[in-house]
Image (cartoon, coloured by chain):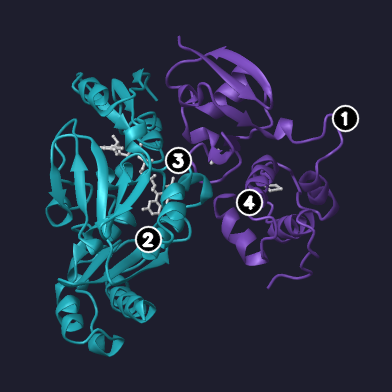
Amino acid sequence: MPKITMNVNGASVSAEVENRTVLSAALREEMGLTGTHIGCDTSQCGACVVHVNGKAVKACTMFAVEADGANVDTIEGQAHADGSLNIIQQAFQDHHGLQCGFCTPGMIMSAAALLKDNPKPTEAEIRDYLEGNICRCTGYQGIVNAIMAASGQSAAIAAE
Amino acid sequence: MYNFEFAKPKTVEEAASAMAAEGAQALGGGQTLLPTMKQRLASPEVLVSLTGIDGMVGVSASGGSVTIGGATTHAQVAADVAESYPALAALAANIGDPAVRNRGTVGGSLANNDPAACYPAGALGSGATITTNKRDIAADDYFQGMFETALDEGEIITSVSFPIPQKANYQKFDQPASRFALVGVFVAKTPDGVRVAVTGASNEGVYRWTAAETALNSDFSQAALEGMSGDADDMISDLHGSGAYRAHLVGVLTRRAVAACG
Ligand SMILES: Cc1cc2nc3c(=O)[nH]c(=O)nc-3n(C[C@H](O)[C@H](O)[C@H](O)COP(=O)(O)OP(=O)(O)OC[C@H]3O[C@@H](n4cnc5c(N)ncnc54)[C@H](O)[C@@H]3O)c2cc1C
Ligand code: FES
Ligand code: FES
């Protein structure tokens, strides 16, 4: 089996995977990083979003061998070194951006990618960017509020 | 999905020889192929990844056209042609969602020729030239019906050249669940006349709406299209929309695209 080496959340990690192993499975099953969730496994829901070389991708729809040599960031690397939540995570907690939490790792990783490119998005831009992230608990307003707050803007009070 | 051998060539020549293997298939961003393989609708024996070929990634603009490497992602196209060809940048920026745009490639989209995909409309509407490792193919000859193209077995799209029109606009009516186009219309006003390409609508895949082109050639205005719509008999009819609905949308979106051209 091919051996791949990735820099995951700042640490070099190697694993032996089959060519057909998708990145989400490599992270969860070979590296024990189960924060990356698998909702649909068909690139619809966004629960598996991670960053590969700084870009948001659906880890269920990329082969692990394609990430050989890449920098990969997952939800496990988002909190500060002392374990305290980063600004987006804290905002999700403060603004009820999650209910069951299943979609949350993907939401946070998508939000982080958005705010890197667009530090002060409008509510419409946030909704547009999250088009590929589905929340079954229908917590969208809380999610949008959290991302508004994390970008230093006052959170919308009601849906437009 | 079934396992396969994996090749990640650095040059088009290496990729072409890898593609000569029995059961070989190209891998672009995998956004279509990977789900297809999971469903076992495709089971290539060898996957030849094209995204490691530097010469197939990137955008260059010169002499009134933009040339896009076949393995360039939708996100990169959206950013890199924003100034040279804004209508094409907007098309790329509205494909799927951000994560799909960070992996999916123009070559993969055109090779797949999904009847609801956006790039086929952009390429046909612009009168693009599709360049492979073997030849140049005019967009007018390239699209041959749903999921059918002029590509031969093992042929690789290395780049696509889009002549920049005087005016152009793409209108996509989203199918919100799939995030593809329910119907999409690309209108381009070029020195050789107006081109109108329609995706998402016809059972034959992307096509040029020649009646609208004729009307717009004599008067490039919304009024010239008054009362015109697509031919419902030729339209896809499914749970998302009847043929009559799609035919209606073809007319509406074409008028909107003309209006947006200014
Ligand atoms: C949720 C979702 C939403 C989407 N929404 C849209 C949308 O709104 N509009 C739209 O247009 N598309 C949409 N797509 C499709 C997306 O654009 C795909 O990326 C694209 O159709 C295929 O490109 P790819 O690079 O991922 O190709 P792959 O999946 O890697 O390959 C697709 C096919 O093309 C072949 N191929 C790949 N590259 C080449 C090449 N350079 N030369 C020859 N053959 C090649 C492969 O062998 C395969 O048969 C969506 C996809 C998803 C998952
Ligand atoms: S699990 Fe990857 S998009 Fe749903
Ligand atoms: S919080 Fe439950 S799916 Fe989003």
Which three-letter amino acid code belongs to the residue tagged 2?
Ser
Q: Residue at (19%, 78%) from the top-left corner?
A: B212
* Residue identified by numbered label 3: B103
Q: Nearer the viewer, residue B214 or B160?
A: B160
Which three-letter amino acid code belongs to the residue tagged 3?
Arg
Label 1 vs 4, first from the N-terminus:
1
Quarter occupied by the C terminus of chain A: bottom right
- Residue B43: % across, % down: 30, 26
Q: Does residue A146 appear to the left or right of B210 in the view shown?
A: right
- Residue A21: % across, % down: 48, 22
Q: Nearer the viewer, residue A59 or A116?
A: A116
- The answer to the question of whether label 4 and label 3 lie on touching residues, with beta carbons closer than 8 A, is no
* Residue identified by numbered label 4: A114
Which chain is disc 2 placed on? Answer: B
Per the model, the C-alpha gap separating discs 3 and 1 is 34 Å
Quadrant field for ligand 1: top left
* Residue identified by numbered label 1: A82
